[in-house]
Image (tube, helix red, strand yellow):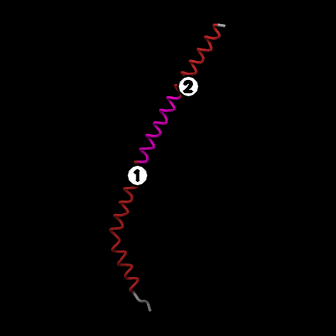
Amino acid sequence: MTRLKQAKDEAARDALHYRSQLESEYQRKISETNDNSGSNVRRLDEETTRKVQSLKDVISKISSTVVVMLMKQVTTVKS
C-alpha cells in the first residue's frame, strides 16, 4: 500500500511539473506574439504615414495643373 501511495504522489508531482512547463512555454509564446504584433502595427503605421505623405506631395505638385485644365474646360465654349 505504501508503494502505491508513493507512486501516486510521484505521478502527481510529475504532472504538476509538466503542467507548469507547458504553462511557462504558453506564456512565452503569447509574449512573443504580442511583441511581434506590436512591431507589425508600428511598421504598418510608419508605412501608411509615408504613403500618405507621398500622396500629399504628388497632389501639391499637380494641383495647379489640374486647376488650369479644369478652368480651360469650363471656360471653353463649343459651338
Residue 72 or 12: which is nearer the viewer?
12
Is label 1 in a helix, a strand or a loop? Answer: helix
Q: Which mark is residue 61?
A: none
Q: Quadrant of residue 61?
A: bottom left
- Disc 2: which residue: 19
Number of residues whose C-alpha sits closer than 10 Å to that of mark 2, classed few (under 14), some (14–19) or many (20 or more) = few
Image point (39%, 58%), residue name: 51
Closer-to-camera residue (17/2): 2
In the picture, measured across the screen, residue 29 lies left or right of residue 1, that is left
Q: Is residue 31 magenta?
A: yes
| Occupied quadrant, residue 62 | bottom left
Q: Which quadrant, please, contains the C terminus?
A: bottom left
Q: Mark 1 is on which residue type?
A: Asp
Q: Image point 33% across, 68% down: which residue? A: 60
Residue stretch in magenta: 23-41
In the current view of this chain or complex, which residue is farthest to the top? 2
Mark 2, secondary structure of its residue:
helix
Location of mark 1 (residue)? 45
Give the crowd class for mark 1: few <14, some 14-19, many >=20 residues within 10 Å.
few
Q: Is residue 38 above or below residue 28?
A: below
Residue 35 location in percent, x, y? 43, 40
Q: Main secondary structure of the magenta part?
A: helix
Residue at position x 45%, y 37% in the image: 32
Identify residue type, mark 2.
Answer: Arg
